[in-house]
Image (cartoon, rainbow, N blue to C red):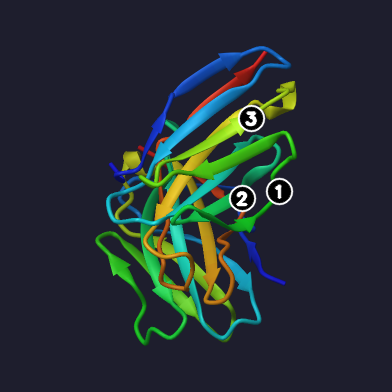
Amino acid sequence: DSGVTQTPKHLITATGQRVTLRCSPRSGDLSVYWYQQSLDQGLQFLIQYYNGEERAKGNILERFSAQQFPDLHSELNLSSLELGDSALYFCASSVRSGGSRDTQYFGPGTRLTVL
Amino acid sequence: AQKITQTQPGMFVQEKEAVTLDCTYDTSDPSYGLFWYKQPSSGEMIFLIYQGSYDQQNATEGRYSLNFQKARKSANLVISASQLGDSAMYFCAMRPSTGNQFYFGTGTSLTVIP
C-alpha cells in the first residue's frame, strides 16, 4: 500500500457525461500528479499540482480539468466524455515539486469505462 | 529532449532464474533520477528502486538491483531468483533535476514460467 488513495476504483458512464475522480496523497506529500494509461497510449502525464498550485501540464485535453484543495487532496474532472477517454487514471504523489530524488508513489488507479 | 526507451516488449524467465530488463535514457540534464515501477495485472503501479545519476554504487533493494552504466545511458533492472509473483509489466522512468515531469518508458511485460 503506497499510502495514496483514489476513489472510485471503477467508474462506468456514458458518452457526453461528466465525472470527477478523487485522490488523497500520502501523508506529508505536497505534490499530486495525474496520469492516463490506455492500451494504445501507454502512461501519459496529464497535470501536476504542488501545494495547491498548478506546476506542470502535459497532454491534458481542454475537456479535462483538475485542482488541488487546501487539504492537499486533488480532483480530476473529465467532461463531455468520449469512448476514447476509457482508461486507467492514476494519481501519484511526492514530497516536493521536482528534483531528481523526488520519488512518485502511485495510487491504485480509477478504471473509467465510457459506453 | 528527454526520452526513455525500453526495447523489450515481452520477456520470459524460468522461476528461480535471474532476468535483466533493459532501459536506456536520453537527457541533457547532468543530474537526474532513474526509477523502476512494477505494474501487476491488478493494475497498481508499485515503486521498486531508485538510482541517482551521481550515486557511486548501483542501487539494490532485496531481489532488485539496478545495473547503472552512466556512459552508456542505461539503467537495467536485474531481478534475481524470479518468482511467479514477479510476472507483471515493468516501467523505467527518469526525472531530471530541472522541470517537474517524470518520463516513462513503454514498459516490458515479464512472464515467469514455473
Q: Which of the 4 image quadrants contains residue A89?
A: top right
Please identify the quadrant where the C terminus of chain B is shown: top left
Task: Please tell me whether mark 1 sits on a helix, a strand or a loop.
Answer: loop
Chain letter for mark 1: A
| Amino acid beneath label 2 | Phe
Q: Which residue was labeled with disc 1?
A: A59
State which tag comes first along the sequence, 3 or 2: 2
| Amino acid beneath label 3 | Leu
Give the CA separation, mark 2 to mark 1.
6 Å
Q: Are marks 2 and 1 in contact (CB under 8 Å)?
A: yes
Q: Residue at x 59, y 81 (%)?
A: B72
Closest to the observer: A9 or B27?
A9
Task: Please tell me whether mark 3 sits on a helix, a strand or a loop.
Answer: strand
State which tag comes first along the sequence, 2 or 1: 2
Classify 10 Å Cα crowding around label 2: few (below 14), some (14-19), many (20 and above): many
Q: Which residue was labeled with disc 2?
A: A45
x then y, percent, for residue A34: 54, 45
Q: Residue at x 55, y 61 (%)?
A: B102
Q: Which residue was labeled with disc 3?
A: A78
Classify 10 Å Cα crowding around label 3: few (below 14), some (14-19), many (20 and above): many
Classify 10 Å Cα crowding around label 1: few (below 14), some (14-19), many (20 and above): few
Q: Which of the 4 image quadrants contains residue B19?
A: bottom left
